[in-house]
Amino acid sequence: MHREVIVLWECFLERSFRGSTPLGEDTNMRQLWQQTEQQLHAKFPQAERVVTPFSDPLFETKEYQAFLRSLGFEPVAQAAFGKLL
């Protein structure tokens, strides 16, 4: 069975645009992720899932994973989070 997957490797605002707001409360980062997902899904409508690494060196891992979970992602592999589109 062949499934189309979008890999979102990095998605972040530069520090000067993030400010000091914790990641889970940063509405700009949330909107960036949601809009990026929507744009990619519009460009690749056959994709069934989006996946992303489980950590990002810009953020503390637990905070980053909580952020991903708040966007509907869940662990799908040892080092990846994902969700159905």
Image: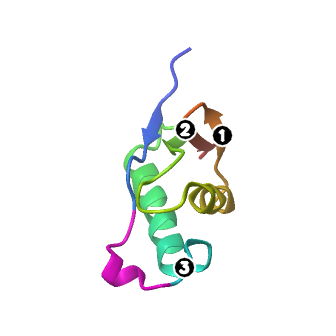
Q: Residue at x 54, y 35 (%)?
A: 79
Q: Secondary structure at mark 3?
A: loop
Tell me if label 1 and label 2 are in contact, CB under 8 Å.
yes
Q: How many marks?
A: 3
Expressed as whole percent of the image width and height from the top left, the position of residue 59 reads: 48, 62
Neighbourhood count class around disc 1 (C-alpha, 10 Å): few under 14, some 14–19, many 20 upward: some
Q: Nearer the viewer, residue 33 or 3?
A: 33
Q: Residues within 10 Å of mark 3 (few under 14, many from 20)?
A: some
Q: Circle 2 — which element?
A: strand
Q: In percent of the image, x 61 and y 72: which residue is there? A: 24
Q: Residue 46, image x and y in percent?
A: 47, 37
In this figure, which residue is indicated by the disc labeled 3?
26
Q: Is residue 61 left or right of residue 43?
A: right
Q: Is residue 15 magenta?
A: yes
60 sits to left or right of 6: right
Residue 17 placement: quadrant: bottom left
Q: CA distance from mark 1 to mark 3?
A: 22 Å
| Tag shown at residue 75 | 1
Residue 83's label in the rendered image is: none
Residue 43: x %, y % from top left: 37, 49
Q: Which residue is at 41% across, 62% downward?
A: 58
Point out the stretch of residues depicted in magenta.
12-20
Q: Three-letter amino acid code at disc 1?
A: Pro
Q: Which residue is mark 2?
A: 80
- Nearer the N terminus, badge 1 or badge 2? 1
Q: Quadrant of residue 68?
A: bottom right
Residue type, label 2: Ala
**Considering only order in the chain, which callout, 3 or 2, is on the residue closer to the N terminus?**
3
**In 3D space, how far apart are the residues under numbered discs 1 and 2 (Cα atoms)?**
6 Å
